[in-house]
Image: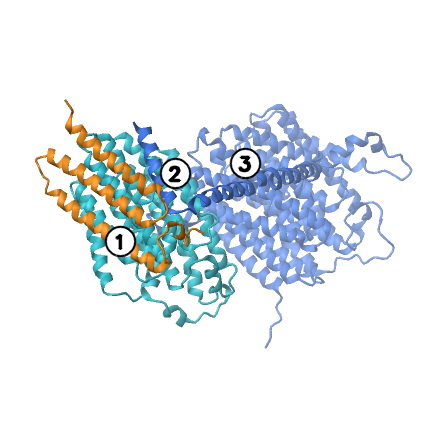
Chain colours: A orange, B blue, C cyan
Amino acid sequence: MVNFSSAMIFVPMVMIFCGAWGFIAYSKHMLNSLLSLEFMMLGVFWLMSSQLALVASEVYFSLFFLTLAACEGALGLTMLILVVRSHGNDMFSSFNLLEC
Amino acid sequence: MIWKISMHEISMLTLVSGSVLCGIAGIKKVSTGVMDVIEWELFNLVSSSIVFTVILDWVSLLFMSFVFLISGSVLFYSGSYMAEDKTSNRFMYLVLAFVLSMSLMVLSPNLISILLGWDGLGLVSYALVIYYSNEKSANAGMLTILSNRVGDVAILLSIGLMSSLGSWNFFFYSYYLNEEWVLLKVFLMISAMTKSAQIPFSAWLPAAMAAPTPVSALVHSSTLVTAGVYLMIRFSAALEGSLVQSWLLIISCLTMFMAGLGANFEYDLKKIIALSTLSQLGVMLSILSLGYADLAFFHLLSHALFKALLFMCAGVVIHSVGGYQDIRFMGNLVKFMPLTVSYMTISNLALCGFPFMAGFYSKDMILEVAFMSSINFIALMLYIMATGLTVMYTMRLIFYSISGEYNLGSINNLSDEDYMMTNSMSGLGLGAILGGACLGWMLFPECYMICLSFIMKMMVIMVSVLGGLIGYTLNMMSVNFTLKSLSNYSLIVFMGSMWFMPALSTLKLSEKSLSSGSYVEKVLDKGWFEFYGGQGLNYMFSNLFYMLNSMHLNSVKIFLKVAVITMIVFMVAVL
Amino acid sequence: MTFPISYLFFFLTLLSGTTLSVSSTSWFGAWLGLELNLLSFIPLITTKLCPYLTEAAIKYFLIQALASTILIMSASIFLYAQSISHVMILLSLLLKLGAAPFHFWFPQVTEGLSWPQAFILLTIQKLAPMFLISYLTFSDTLMSIIMFSALLSSLVGALGGLNMMKLRKLMAFSSINHMAWMLVGIYLGDIYWLIYFTFYSFVSGSVIMLLYSTHSFTVSNLLNQSSKSLLLNMFIPMNILSLGGLPPFLGFAPKWIMIQFLSANSMFIPLLVLLTSSLITLYFYLRLFIPLSLLSFSFFISNVKLTSLFSSSYTLLSMSFINIFGILFPIPFMI
C-alpha cells in the first residue's frame, strides 16, 4: 500500500527542485528563468493544496497563493519587456553593467 | 608726569608689605591656634563639587611671610645685580611667577592644586636656570627639570591613588592613612625627595647653580628646595610610625653626610653653598622623619633667612671680583668689602650654629632632640660627622675667601658701595642674627625637656670645634708642599663628586637607554612591528578585499547558484 | 526631489506589505506581505528606462522571487518536517535580507539604484525579514545559524568595503556590517536590534541625504566638489564618522548599548569579532574623510558666508546636527 500522504509531499518537491534547477542552471535567456519560476510556483501550489487539504480542507487559501503567483509572473514578464527595451535582448550575459 | 619707578622697587614694596601682613596674621594664628580653611566652589557637576581650597594656618602664613620677605629682598637686590642685563624685566617676571607658584603650593591642602604649584615651581626654576642661555646652563636646566619631573609624576600617581578616597585634600586625610596606603606614602616621599634633592636625586641642586645668583638665593637655597620639606611637614601625620619614615631617616642622614663631605672638596663658591643647603635639607628631613615636624619647620624658617643672606653675599662677591666663582681666586676680601664680609660671616656662623645666631636655636635643638630620641647607631654617627663637616667647610670657605692673601688680578674694583645690594641684605642680616631667637620664643613657648649625658651634651661643641680647626688648618698649605690629595686620588674624586651622583644621573643613565631606544626603534617600531603590524595588516586585508571583490563581481545567475548550494550545505550540516 | 504620484501609492503598498508580514500570525501571511513588498518595490526602482535601474530591478526580482518561493515551500512542508522547515525559512529570510553567506547580490543591486531608492533598500526593505527572523529564535540550531551569519556579515562588510571607491557599494557593505550588529541584537532580544535599527536608519539616512544633495557617487565626486561649501565639508565627514560609530557622535550610541549587553551576557568572542570589523570599517570611513577635510582648500578658509549655511535645506541641517551632537543631548538633564 503506497503512503499517499508522503507521495503528496515528495512528488511536488521533486517538481520544485526541477524548477529550481532550471532557474539556477540555465543562464542564457531570462524567459527561461521566468518559466522555471512559474514551474516552481506550480509545484508549490500542488504541495500547498495537498497540505491544506490535510488541514481542515482550507483549500481556499491556495487561491490567494495563485493570485500572488500570477501577479509575480506578470511582474516578471513586465521586467522582461523592460529589459528587452533597455538592453535589446534578454540574455543574462548582457546584464553586466553592474558587474564592475 | 611720568614716574620712573622700576620694577624691582614696586615688587620689593609689594612683597615686603605682603610679608608683614602674612607675618602679623601668622603670629595671630600662632597665639590663638586657629586654622582658617577657605573653600571656593568653582562649579558643581553631577553632584560632585569642584572646590578650590586655601588653607591659612600659622604654618602656611609664616612660610608665606618668609617667602615674601626673601623674594622682596632678592628682587630689590637683583635690581642692581641684573642692571646691566638686557632682559632684566623678564627676569623679574620669572621670579614673580616663581613666588606665585610657591604661594599656590604653600597655601593649598589639596593635592591637585599642590601639583599646579609644584609643576609651576619646576617650570619656572627651569626657565631661571637656563636664563644665561649657554651650553652649561642648558644642561643644568635639563638635569633640573628632568629630576623634578620624577617628583611631578610621583604626585600624579598619588593623585590617582587618592581618587578612591573621594577627595584630594590629603591634609585632612593624613591622620587616617594606615599601613595600607604605603604606596601613597612612598610616592609622596619620592616627590619630596626630588624637590629637596635627597640622595638619588641630588645631582641637580649643585648643577642648578648655573642660574643667576639672586635666583640661587631665592630658589635653590631657601624656598624651592624646601617645598619638598614643606610637603612632608604637611603630610607628617601619615608618616608617623610607618616604614617609610625609617627609609626617609636613612636617606636624609646619608644626604646630610654626603653633602657636607662634598662641600669640603669643592672650589666653586656657589656650589659650596648649594651643598651646604643640601646638607641642611638633610637635617630638616631627618628630624622630620624622627617625628618632630615642628622642629623641621623651625629649622626651615631660620635656615631660609641665613641661607638667602649667604647667597646674596656670595652674589656681591662674585659680582665685584668680575664673575669669578672659584674661591682660590679670592682671599683677603675683609679688607676690601667689610660690610659684605661681615654679613657673610654672620650667616656662616649662623649656619654652623654659633651660639645665639639664628641657626643655633634650631640646629642645637634638632641635634639634641635627635641624640635623645631612639635613633640607630649609623644615623647617630652620620649626624655627628655631618655637624663637624658643616663647621669644617664653613671654616674652609672663610679661610679661602675672606682671610689669607689676596689672589685676584692686579687691577680690580672691589667695594661695598653698591647700596642697593647691601641695603637689601640688611633685613636678612638682622634676621640671621635675631630670627632664630624670635621664632624660638614664638613657636615654642614651652621648653623642650632635654636629658642627655655630659658627653653627649658636649658632643656638638666638641665636634664643631674639631671640625672648625681641621677645616681651617688643613687648608693652610703652601705652593712648596706636595699635594697629599693626589695619593688618594680616586677616593678624593669619589667624595668630591657627590659620590658620582652627577655622572650617574646624566651620562650613565642616558647613554644605554638612548642607544637601546634607537635600536628598539629601528628593529621593532620601524621594523617588525611595521612589517607585521600596520603594513602587514593592510596587505592582508587588501588581499582579502580583492578576493571578496572578485566574488562580488559576478553574474546574478552565479549568485543564485551559490545561494541555493549554500542552503543545501546548511541543510546537510544541520541535519 | 520630484516624483510621479504613483510613487505614493507604491510606497504605501510597500509599507503595508511590510506591516502585513510583520503582523501576520502565519507564515502564509508573512509570505503574502513579502510578496506585496516585492511587487511594490520593483515599480519604485524602475522609474525610467535606464539600463542600470533595469538591471538592478531584475537582479533584485530574481533573488527575491527565489527566496520567497523557498519560503512558501518550506512553510508548506511545516507539518511534515518541522525542523527542516524552520531552518529553510530562516535561510530564505537571510537571502532576502542579504546577510552574509547570501550577500553577493546586495552591493550590485545597491550600485544600480539612485540614492533615495538605495535608502529604501538599505532600511525599509530590511524591516520585514528582520522581524520575521526575530520570530525564529526558539531553537539552538536557529540561534547558531543567526550568530554564524552575523559574524560572517561583520567580516564581509568590513573587508568588502575596504578599497571601495564607489559610495553606494560602500554604503551597502557598511549596511551588511551594521546588519551583523542587528543580527546579534536579535540574538540578545527584540529591543536591542530595534534600537540599533532605529539609530542606523537615522544615521544612514542623514549620510545618504548629504550624499544625494551633493550628487556624489564616487570618492572622486566628493573630491571634485569639496571646494564648494564649508558646511558640507564639515558635515559629510562627521556624518560618515557617525555612521562608523566613532564615540562623540550619535552612531556610537547603539554600539555602546550592544557592547554593554554583549559583555553583560559575557559573549566576548562575538563582541571581539564585531569590534574588530568595526575598526576596519572606521578605516574606510576615514578614507572618505581625507579628500573632504585634508585635500580641500576651503576647510581652512575662515570667512565663511552665512548664506552658504542657509542655502542647504533645514531638514538636512537639523538631521546632520542631531547626527553629530545627538549623543550629547541628554547631558543637560544629567547635571
Say whether marks 3 and 2 touch (CB < 8 Å).
no
Q: Can residue C265 be seen in this view?
A: no
State which chain disc 3 sits on. B
Q: In the displayed structure, does residue B153 sit left or right of residue B570?
A: right
Amino acid type at mark 1 = Leu
State which quadrant residue A12 falls in.
top left
* Image height of B52 relative to B495, above or below: below
**Do callouts 2 and 1 point to residues on the same chain?**
no
Q: Can residue B155 be seen in this view?
A: yes
Question: Which residue is the site of mark 2?
Answer: C152
Nearest the camera: B187 or A77? A77
Amino acid type at mark 3 = Met
**Do callouts 3 and 2 point to residues on the same chain?**
no
Real-space CA distance between mark 2 and mark 1, rounded to the nearest whole angstrom: 35 Å
State which quadrant residue C145 falls in.
top left
| In front: label 3 or label 1 | 1
Nearest the camera: B405 or C252? C252
Q: How many labels does the image show?
A: 3
Q: Position of residue C101 (x, y in %)?
A: 36, 39
Say whether marks 2 and 1 touch (CB < 8 Å).
no
User: What secondary structure is marked by label 1?
Assistant: helix
* Image height of B10 relative to C88, above or below: below
Question: Which residue is the site of mark 1?
Answer: A77
Question: Which residue is the site of mark 3?
Answer: B189
Locate the C terminus of chain B and report the quarter of the image it occupies. Answer: top left
Amino acid type at mark 2 = Leu
Residue at the farthest bottom position: B1
Q: Residue at x 46, y 40 (%)?
A: B160
